[in-house]
Amino acid sequence: MKKITLISLIAASTIFGANVEFRDANPNFNRINPTIDQNSILSYNSSIQKAKQTVVNISTTKTTKVKNNLNNLMNDPFFKEFFGFGFNIPEQRSKKSSSLGSGVIISSDGYIVTNYHVIEDSDEIIVSMLDNSKEYKAKIIGSDPKTDLAIIKIDAKNLEPAYFADSSKLLEGDVVFAIGNPFGVGGSITSGIISGLNKDNIGLNQYEDFIQTDASINPGNSGGALIDSRGALVGINSAILSRSGGNNGIGFAIPSNMVKTIAQKLISDGKITRGYIGVMIANLTKDQKEIYKNKEGALITNVEKDYPASKAGLQRGDLIIKVDNKIIKSANDLKNIIGAYSPNTKINLEYERAGKIYSTKLQLADTDVTDNTAENLSIDGLSVQNLSEEIKYKYKIPQEIKGILITDVKDGSNAAHTGFESGDIIIQVNEKIINNINEFSQEIKASKASKRKPIIWINRAGILMGLVLK
């Protein structure tokens, strides 16, 4: 359920500042049970047909670099002896691939929401209506890998946008329909019910609050619509839980309220910035509930030095129960609520400590820590990130490890030729232990100024290696 269509990447800065007026479904509605009537057939055709007009097919093409296996063959001494040393075979070759997915129109002038993994790393994106009446080239407006959402735009007018339901009003057992482009067969509809709400810890996204449904979701449905029985959008289909890759009746959709919030930020700013307080958190265990007055909340298991929580005096063992009067029931609640705020936002926070309730105010930091550009690092093609508590938790990095994490290495760059790989942790440059990006950058610049080739020590899956910068 990954990848999709034709798209030309554009500078989103030319359209940042735009706004979308979402169409909200009627919040006042009644749930009814079907009646027995021999002269009537229960059908959702009218609701579904209107909703189908808001769903699109997405197809993408992507160019990837793959290693040339002939290099291993030609490095064999036997082949070198008999065939000589004159072969000049490229280490990598380009490979084009295509994939399919779905999207949902959210404005009459062409804004479309889909999954990030549908358009990830695409060279081109093509959008077509479910009836294949017309095709459009799409451009990426913004994306948010942490929620697996993205906004693309086509040059079109008078489109039919979706009506957004209030996903906070959903109940288990509500009838829902999944609309999309499974296996590339074109517009397709499957039915089911809402099997569960507020599902987290699935391991799909960093920010999770999934709707679970047994409506069949298959490869190609990603980014399509999950609608209620009146045709209003309740979620964006995102993933399935399956060992075989096919539908097993356990599908997940991103709720419409989260979609609306992320979409608006991506359209107006082109990116998502999130607040960060600098703590590691967990849910209360059965035993822990016996020693806290509040039986729900987010338990602080570690506090990161020099971040907002530390500055506000929060400690390990504090149980956060409210943020700006919003009740915190779990660790996931706190993560999602804090992540919905922008950096530098001031919040009020309530917590329990030693049986007493305290409150404090703090100003949020930014989750995307400091500079990670090749220019600031003075190494071509290298992107890094400080090893915050959040990053260690996300990548299961032991707490005692210090350094900076390599998040990307550009093909053909100086960083790639030196031997860096994504996931490496830089721990030392020459004789200097590295704790953050600034220290790393300063040491690299100092080496260049002294015309000394630096040796950069990395931790690669527990193996220590020294790489000499090319």
Image (cartoon, helix red, strand yellow):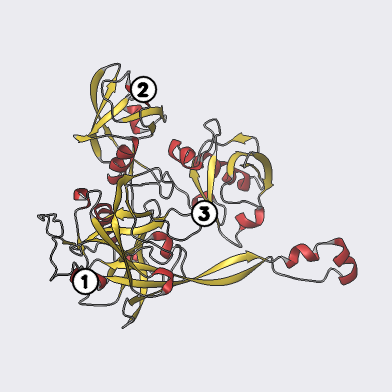
Query: Which mark lies nearer to you, 3 or 1?
Result: 1
Residue 6 seen from this side: no
Measured in 3D between alpha carbons, the distance from the residue under mark 1 to the one under mark 2, in whole angstroms, is 51 Å
- Where residue 21 appears, as percent x and y from the top left, is 17, 63
Q: Give me the disc on residue 374.
A: 3
Measured in 3D between alpha carbons, the distance from the residue under mark 3 to the one under mark 1, in whole angstroms, is 54 Å
- Where residue 35 appears, as percent x and y from the top left, is 13, 60
In the image, taking residue 220 as reference, residue 47 lies left or right, namely left
Image quadrant assignment for residue 232? bottom left
What's the residue type where badge 3 is placed? Ala
What's the residue type where badge 1 is placed? Asn
Pick whichever, 31 or 408, lies toward us. 31
Q: Is mark 2 on a helix, strand or loop?
A: helix
State yes or no: discs 3 and 2 in contact (Cβ < 8 Å): no
Query: Which mark lies nearer to you, 3 or 2?
Result: 2
With respect to residue 107, does 265 lie above or below? above
Q: Which residue is farthest right?
A: 81
Task: Identify the residue at image location x=22%, y=77%.
Answer: 157
- Circle 2 residue: 288
- Where residue 164 appears, as percent x and y from the top left, is 20, 60
Quadrant in the picture for the N terminus: bottom left
Question: In the rendered structure, which disc, 3 or 2, sits on the residue that comes first in sequence?
Answer: 2
Task: Identify the residue at image location x=24%, y=66%.
Answer: 106
Q: What element carries label 1?
A: helix
Measured in 3D between alpha carbons, the distance from the residue under mark 3 to the one under mark 2, in whole angstroms, is 46 Å
Image quadrant assignment for residue 51? bottom left
What's the residue type where badge 2 is placed? Gln
With respect to residue 116, does 334 lie above or below? above
Question: In the rendered structure, which disc, 3 or 1, sits on the residue that comes first in sequence?
Answer: 1
- Where residue 361 appears, as percent x and y from the top left, is 24, 30
- Circle 1 residue: 45
